[in-house]
Amino acid sequence: MERMCMKKRTALARDRHKLTTELENQRKMNAQREDQKRLWFEEWCSFYRERRRKERRNTKAARKAGRAINTLFAVGFPFSYTEEQAKSLFVGDGMQGFEALSFNQKEGKAPIAFIRFSSADLATEAMRKLQGFKIAESSKLVDAASSGRSPVSTLRLAFAKYELASKR
């Protein structure tokens, strides 16, 4: 009888060990599945966030493109350039559609200008013609060389973010 009890105990111990091992393996597999689900969900969320960012960016650009900007932003004028000289640059040489010019120059800084045209097409044409236009410094070349600035400035044009307001 004692042998029988011993066999039963040994069998029970083996079964308990077998069940414990199976339970541990199932727990490990469940943990791995949960990790895979979590990783998949994180990847999906980051993909979705990036897609939403791109959609918002495209929507914003489409809205902006819906209302064409007729105003150009110009930089690269020489320090000694005046508003009249800038105006003559955008009125002459077959430029059409010029409406207004806002010329800003602060002390110690190169001037900038906002130029409004009658249509976006004419503004595009003006930008195409004058992009990279070289303007010579009207002051003495020795002055420009000694100050470290180049005697020739290159005009750079871009569409402004906002329309130049019309004067009332």
Image (cartoon, rainbow, N blue to C red):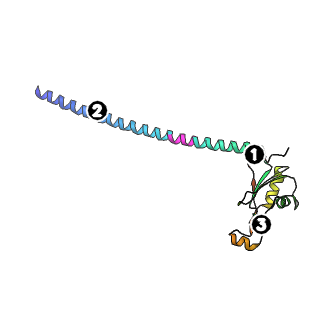
Mark seen at residue 134: 3
Q: Secondary structure at mark 1?
A: helix
**Residue at image location 69% in from the left, 43% down from the top:** 60
The C terminus, quarter of image: top right
Residue range corresponding to the magenta coloring:
42-48
Label 2 sits on residue? 19
- Residue 145 percent location from the top left of the image: 71, 72
Q: Residues within 10 Å of mark 3 (few under 14, many from 20)?
A: some
Mark seen at residue 65: 1
In the displayed structure, does residue 92 sit left or right of residue 145? right
- Residue 157 percent location from the top left of the image: 75, 57
- Residue 105 percent location from the top left of the image: 75, 57
In the displayed structure, does residue 107 sit left or right of residue 35? right
Q: Residues within 10 Å of mark 1 (few under 14, many from 20)?
A: few
Q: Which of label 3 and label 1 is nearer to you?
A: 3
Q: Main secondary structure of the magenta part?
A: helix
